[in-house]
Image (cartoon, rainbow, N blue to C red):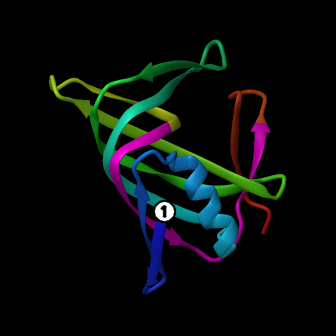
Amino acid sequence: MQYRKFGGKYFVRIDKGEEVIAQLKVLCEKENIKLAEVRALGASDDYTVAVFDVNEKKYAKFHHNEYSEITSLWGTVTAMNGEFYPHIHMTAGTAEGKVYGGHLVEVRISATCEMIVEPSEGIIERKFNDEVGLNLFEFVN
């Protein structure tokens, strides 16, 4: 991974073989980013996305092991118990024109990933909500 900061935004290149969430964590910890919006595109040959079942209150995971274009990757960086907490969604299109998407579990890059991380001042913590079954924004200040 390589990155540079321009005008308050980080422009990030994630390289072949690297896992996106792991590299995002490295960037956020190194640069002390606690709250940010994340956007990216790129290419992958191995990714897992999930869809939340609101009745069961659990995620169903779907693994894809084929060359795909990351058509959209978007989400937030917040904190839970003071630790890095990404909430990212991704869609990816295959060579056959099929598109898969959902909550990003992990994605390994097959060529490159171009990401923009736009930090904001402040911290938003996450707190588990029993009714919904998810870790929701908790505005403390």
Magenta part of the protein: which range?
107-128
Q: Residues within 10 Å of mark 1 (few under 14, many from 20)?
A: some
Amino acid type at circle 1 is Met
Quadrant of residue 69 in the image? top left
- Magenta residue check for 126: yes
107 or 37: nearer the eye? Answer: 107
Q: Furthest residue to the front?
A: 17
127 or 75: nearer the eye? Answer: 75
Residue at image position (65%, 70%) is 33
The image shows residue 9, relative to residue 89, as above or below, that is below
Residue at image position (44%, 31%) is 47
The image shows residue 96, relative to residue 72, as above or below, that is above
Q: Furthest residue to the left?
A: 96
Residue beneath disc 1: 1
- Magenta residue check for 118: yes
Residue at image position (32%, 25%) is 66
Q: In this view, does 106 lie to the left or right of 58?
A: left
Residue 35 visible in the snapshot: no
x and y percent of residue 40 in the render?
37, 55
Residue at image position (17%, 28%) is 95
Number of marks present in the image shown:
1
Q: What element carries label 1?
A: loop
x and y percent of residue 121 in the render?
63, 77
Overall secondary structure of the magenta stretch?
Answer: strand
Q: In which quarter of the image is the C terminus?
A: bottom right
